Image: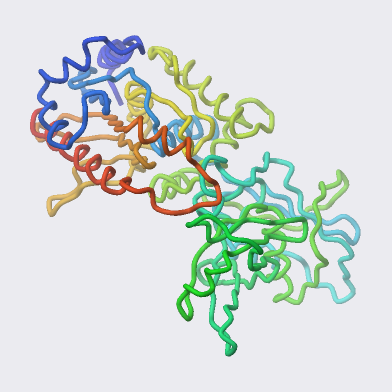
Amino acid sequence: MLRPLVLAALLASLSAPTQADPGAVAALERAPESKLVRDAGFAPDDIGFVAVDLDDGRAVAEHLADSLFIPASVAKLATVYPAQQLLGADFRFETKLYRAGDALYLQGGGDPVLDNIALRDLARQIKPDKNARWRSFFYDASSVAAEAEVDHGQPAEAVYNAGFGALNVDFNRVQINWSREDDGKIAFHPRAVADGLNVPADWIRLLPAEGAEPPGANFLYAGDGSGERWLYAPDLAETLPEDGALFLPVKAPAADTARVFRRIAADLSIALPEPRAGTVPTDAVLVGSIQSPPLPAVIAGLLKYSNNVTAELIGMAASRKLTGRVLDPTASSAALGGWLSNRLSYVDWSGFKLLNHSGLSSLNRASPRQIAAILTAIARDPVLTPLLSPIMGDDRGAMAEAKTGTMDFACGLAGFLTAKSGRRLAFTIFVIDRKRRAALDASFDSRVLAPTPGAQAWLGRAHALEEALLKNWRQRF
C-alpha cells in the first residue's frame, strides 16, 4: 500500500503532458541508456520507456514516455485492472442448463475457461428419466456480443485469432489429427481436446480447395450454418508427413460448444437433437449450472498464457457490469478506457486507444506513462500484484514480474522490478519499427499464415534491449 504523500508524488510524476518533448530524442544521447539502445541497433525514436520508483513516486528513468506505441499484449493490463475492480475477486462466470417442456437450453455466460470436463459435469446434472425425450436442443448465446475472430487484421488460420462469445469451449480451438490412408490420401480427424476428455468433432469438415492459393495459405475458413468448414490447399496433402496434428481456431464457438455438449451428453445416454440458436424462455426451469474458477484464477492464467479470447471475455464482462449493456469489443474497450481515464485522472489519456481487450491489433495505441499508471494502481491491489509472471530469471531468481506483448516489429514489456538496493520500480518499455510495421499492415492477406521475413531477428534484438534496460535499472537504482 502506498503512503498518501508518496502517492501524491507519484501522481505528479505521472501527470506530464502526452506530447513528446521535441528534445527527447537528443536527450536520450545524454542518458545512461543511450549506449544500450545503440548497441541493440535501434534509433532513439524506436523506443519509449519509463521507470517509476514506487517508494517516492519519481520517474527515475524515461524516454518518449508520452509517445504512443503499439502495446500488443501489454494492453491486457488495461483489461485485468478494471475487471478486477468492477467485477471483484469473487466473480465467477456461469454456464446454465434450462428446461422448457421437452426443450433443453444451454445458456452461456461468457466463460473463457469452460472445457469438456465442465460440460460433462453440467450434463450429469440432467436427471435420468427413461421416458424423457428431448425434441429440441437450443443454445442461448445472447449475453455476449459474438465475434468470429479477435482481430480482422490477423490471419484467419491463426489459433490466437479464434472467435468468441457467450459459449466457448477448450479456448475455441480444435485439434486436427491426420493420417495417410492406404490409397495415399490424407484423412483428417478433428476433435475438441481437454485434459482427460477428448471429443470427436466430425461436424468440422476439411475439404480440398478447388483453386491455387497464395504461398502460406494452407487453410481457408469456409464455415456455414451446418458447422465449421476449412478448405486446405491442394498441395498441402502432398507435403504433410504421414501423420501428425495441428490446431485450427473455431469461428462459430457457440454452435461448436453446443455440439460438443451434445456429443458428451450422448456418451451419458442422453440423446439430444442437433442444436439450434434460441433464447431461454421466461418460464424455463433451471436444470443445472457450472461456474468457472474465481476471477483472480482466470486472470492468473490470462497473464501467464496471454490467451486473447480470455482477455476479450473478461473485458466484455467488466464493461457489461459497468454499463449494464452487451457491447461489442470496440465499444467495450472504449468503456473501460473511459473508466481508466476517470479512475486514473492524474494521467493525460490523450491518444490512448484500444479496439479490443487483448491487444491483438496494430491499431491499438498506448504510451509508456499510461501503462505505468495502470501498473501503479495494480501495485496497490493485493489480488492482482502477485499474478504477474516472473521473467528473465537466473539461479538467484527472477529479475522482474511482467506482462509481455509481441507483434511483428512491435513489442512491449511492463511490470515490476526490484533493484539491488531494494527499491521497487514499475516500468514500461515499448519498441517498434514503424516503417516495417506499416509495410506489413499494408501488404496484409488474411489467408496467409507464414513467418514474416526479418521479424524474428528484430524481436530478438528488442528482447535483448529490454533485458539490458532492466539489468541497467536494477544495478543503478
Name the outermost residue toward the bottom: 182
Q: Point out the image quarter for the C terminus.
A: top left
Colour convention of the picture: rainbow
Q: Which is nearer the eye, 199 or 234?
A: 234
Percent across and percent down for residue 105 are: 79, 55
- The part of the image, by quadrant, that contains residue 221 is bottom right
Residue 342 in the figure: left or right of residue 261:
left
In the rendered image, the vertical position of residue 199 relative to residue 115, given as above or below: below
Residue 45 image point, x, y percent: 26, 23
Q: Where is residue 161 drawn, in percent x and y?
A: 53, 48
Q: Position of residue 378 (x, y in %)?
A: 37, 30
- Displayed quadrant of residue 220: bottom right
Inspect this view and state whether residue 54 appears. Answer: no
Q: Residue furthest front?
A: 212
Q: Is residue 95 above or below residue 202?
A: above
Q: Is residue 12 visible?
A: yes
Residue name at image x 17 percent, y 49 percent: 397
Please identify the quarter of the rendering in which residue 68 is found.
top left
| Residue drawn at point x = 83 percent, y = 56 percent | 99
Is residue 97 shown above or below 57? Answer: below
Screen quadrant of the N terminus? top left
Identify the residue shown where x is 48% and y is 79%. 243
Number of numbered discs visible in the structure rendering: 0
From the viewer's side, name the closer residue of 124 and 341. 341
Q: Is 114 situated left or right of 385 in this image?
A: right
The residue lying at 52 percent from left, 57 percent from top is 217
